[in-house]
Amino acid sequence: MARAESTNPPSRIRKRIATAIAFVGIAVIGGQLARVWPREVDVAYRSDEDVQRLDVDVVLDGEAVASARFYRLPEDRDDFLHTVSLPPGEYEARITVYAADGRGVQHSRVIVVPSAGLTRFDLRGR
């Protein structure tokens, strides 16, 4: 004997439950993605005027995840500016500052992502 299937549309309650489940799923997935989605961080490196070059490696768990090399032109007097895109977390910035005589001095600083506003590192010799 054949069984007749219902052709009645789902009730309003079922539609609301399905919609609520969909929104909860989207919120959970969005929350997970937000924790790992890269953010742009602006970093300014202040150095002495005789600094000719700056090498920066952004390190996580011992491995460089971003690098930048900066060269000062004769007309430059401002900080070295760097925008880097990183997932949330705490990173080490390994910075080597090279003076005009070629001598390099190493520095280490912490970059926290996300950060509010501009992160500034003062690398001037005192």
Image (tube, rainbow, N blue to C red):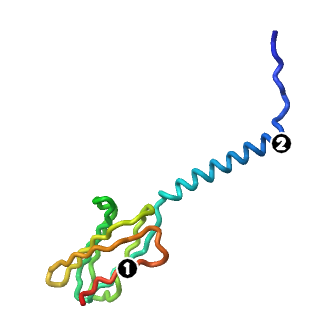
Q: Which residue is mark 1?
A: 44
Rendered location of residue 81, percent (x, y): 37, 78
Instruction: Report the quarter where the N terminus lies.
Output: top right
Q: How far is disc 1 from disc 2 in space, using C-alphas? A: 56 Å
Crowd around label 1: few <14 · some 14–19 · many ≥20 (10 Å): some
Name the residue furthest top.
Answer: 1
Instruction: Label 1, secondary structure: give it.
Output: strand
Mark 2 belongs to which amino acid? Arg
Name the residue furthest right.
Answer: 8
Q: Which mark is residue 12?
A: 2
Rendered location of residue 59, percent (x, y): 31, 64
Instruction: Report the quarter where the C terminus lies.
Output: bottom left
Locate residue 52: give its quadrant: bottom left
Considering only vertical position in the picture, is 21 above or below 63?
above
Q: Earlier in the sequence, mark 1 or mark 2?
A: 2
Rendered location of residue 113, percent (x, y): 44, 67
Instruction: Label 2, secondary structure: give it.
Output: helix
Q: Disc 1 vs disc 2: which is toward the camera?
A: 2
Along the horizontal axis of the image, is 95 left or right of 18?
A: left
Mark 1 belongs to which amino acid? Ala
Q: What is the number of callouts on the image?
A: 2
Task: Name which residue lies at 50% across and 58% down.
Answer: 35
Rendered location of residue 107, percent (x, y): 25, 76
Considering only vertical position in the picture, is 81 above or below 66?
below
Along the horizontal axis of the image, is 114 left or right of 111?
A: right
Task: Name which residue lies at 52% across and 54% down.
Answer: 33
Task: Name which residue lies at 41% across and 69% down.
Answer: 112
